[in-house]
Image (tube, grey):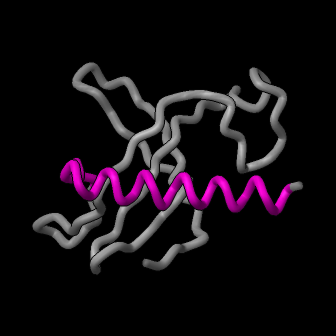
Amino acid sequence: MTMEDEDMIVVFTDDDGNEFYYREDFLVEIDDKKFAVLVSISEDDEEDCGCDDDDCDCGGDTFIARIEPDEKGEEIYVDPTDEEFEMVREAYEEYLSEEDEEEE
């Protein structure tokens, strides 16, 4: 299992053309597959919760996705299997726990 330290903003567009912004909060590779934990963001998130850093987790939706190449070779996000979901969730919780310990 490996982790990457890159933040990337992902934009999803629904059927009505509404855009939703997510930040890749956590990237992990498990069994040669890449996964991302995506946390919703908005332009005024920092004002709403008072956070002034990139590690804000004051709310919003969180998704776990497997990253795979599409037919053009571009990375897309797909739903993980239940087993993959649990492995990534556990890795993410461990990561958050370690982050909390470092702050203390």
Kindly report the secondary structure that dominates the magenta region of the rendered protein.
Answer: helix
Quarter holding the N terminus is bottom left
The structure residue drawn at horizontal position 39% and vertical position 73%, both measured from the top left corner, is: 29
**Is residue 28 rendered to the left or right of residue 70?**
right
Quarter holding the C terminus is bottom right
The structure residue drawn at horizontal position 58% and vertical position 35%, both measured from the top left corner, is: 41
The structure residue drawn at horizontal position 84% and vertical position 28%, both measured from the top left corner, is: 50
Q: Is residue 22 above or below residue 97?
A: above
**Most foreground residue, 25 or 84:** 84
**Is residue 80 rendered to the left or right of residue 103?**
left
Q: The magenta stretch spans which residues?
A: 77-103
The structure residue drawn at horizontal position 37% and vertical position 48%, both measured from the top left corner, is: 64
Is residue 64 one of those drawn in magenta?
no
Rendered location of residue 26, percent (x, y): 53, 59
Rendered location of residue 38, percent (x, y): 46, 46
Is residue 95 one of those drawn in magenta?
yes
Count of marks, rendered view: 0
**Is residue 48 rendered to the left or right of residue 17?**
right
Q: Is residue 24 above or below residue 43?
A: below
**Is residue 44 rendered to the left or right of residue 66?**
right
Rendered location of residue 5, percent (x, y): 60, 71
Rendered location of residue 79, percent (x, y): 22, 48
The outermost residue toward the right is: 104
